[in-house]
Image: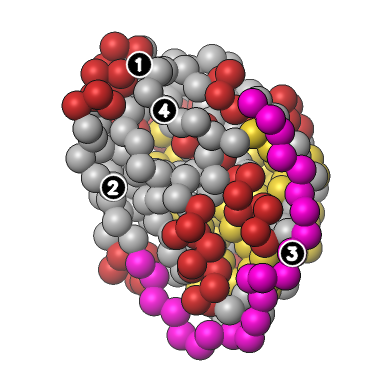
Amino acid sequence: MAQTRRKRRSKHRGTPAGTIETRGRTGRKPRPEERKAAGSGAPRGRRNRFDQQPTWRSAAGRAGVAAGIFLAAVIAVFRQNIAAAISAENCFVLRRDEADRGLVVDPGDEPDRILATVDELGIGVDAILLTHTHFDHVGAVAPVARATGAPVYCPRIEVPVLADIMSYVPWPGFGPFESYDADETVAGGERLQLAGFDLDVMFVPGHSPGHVAYSIADEEALFSGDVIFQGSVGRTDLPGGDWPTLARSIATLVDALPAETRVHPGHMGLTTLGQEAATNPFLREIAAQR
C-alpha cells in the first residue's frame, strides 16, 4: 500500500466556536461477516476490553472533562467490531477553553467525522498524537493529517507499523487503511508543548511494544490508550503484548500520577486512576502482588 506523507493545508482553521458539548456513541452492531471474521481469528487471552460491553455515554464525558479543556468528541469513531463484541475506539479532539488550536488523539476511523468536529470547534490542529499503532487507533491518521497539515507523533518503536498498517491487521475483514510516515517520534520522557498544553509522554508498554500515554499534569488528565479501562485493562494476546510488562506499566501510572487523574481511555468510558485502583480487579491484583 502506498504511503502518505504530510502536506500542509490550512482548511481547518478559524476562530473559537464557544461552548462545545461532548458527543459520543458506543458503536453499531457488527455485521455477520465481521462477527465471523473476528470470531475465527481473535485469540482469547486474559479477560480484556473486547469481552465487555462499551459503557461510554456522552453525559459521562461532560461530567468528566478536566477544568479548562473542551473534549469535542469524537468518541467511538471506530466502526469495526472485534471478537464478536461491540467495540468502539475513542478518538479525542481537545483544546483549552476558547483556544483556537487543539490536538487530536488516536484517530481510529471515520476521518470525515473527526474533521467535522475540528471544523465545528473552529480550531487549527497542532498535532495528532498516537498512543500506539494498532489499526483501530490509526486507521484515520493519513486523511486527518492530510486535511489538517498537523504533524503525527508516533511511538518510535511502532513507526514501521504506521508505515504499513495493513500488514499488521491480525484478522481478515478490516480496512483497507492508508499507511503514513510519522512526522515525529516519542519514546517516553519527553515534554511536549502543543496547543497550549504541556504534555508528559510516559512509556507504558505491554499492550503493544511501544505504547505511550500522554499526561497533562495541570489538568489531571491522562490519555491512556489501551492500558487502563473502566473496570478492565488492555489485552495482551496480540503480537508484542505481554502481561507482566503491562502490569508494570499500570503500576508506574498509579505511582506517578494523582488518584484524581481523569483517565481518557482508548475504549469504554472515562474514569479516574483512584476509581480503578479501588475497584478494577486487574489493578487490585497488581497491587496485591507488589
Q: Distance between the residues labelled 2 and 1?
A: 19 Å
Secondary-structure class at tag 2 = loop
Q: Residues within 10 Å of mark 3 (few under 14, many from 20)?
A: few
**x and y percentages locating residue 135 in the rendered image:** 52, 32
Q: Distance between the residues labelled 3 and 4?
A: 29 Å
The kind of residue tagged 2 is Gly
Where does label 2 land, which residue? 27
Q: Main secondary structure of the magenta part?
A: loop
Q: Residue 9 carries which label?
A: 3
Q: Find out whether residue 27 is within the magenta segment.
A: no
The kind of residue tagged 4 is Phe
Secondary-structure class at tag 1 = loop
Q: Distance between the residues labelled 4 and 2?
A: 15 Å
Where does label 1 land, which residue? 42
Q: Find out whether residue 4 is within the magenta segment.
A: yes
The kind of residue tagged 3 is Arg
Q: How far apart are marks 3 and 1 (CA)?
A: 39 Å
First to last magenta residue range: 1-23
Instruction: Tell me whether circle 3 and circle 4 mark residues in contact (CB < 8 Å).
Output: no
The kind of residue tagged 1 is Ala
Q: Is residue 191 above or below residue 156?
A: below
Quadrant of residue 20 within the rendered picture: bottom left
Secondary-structure class at tag 3 = loop
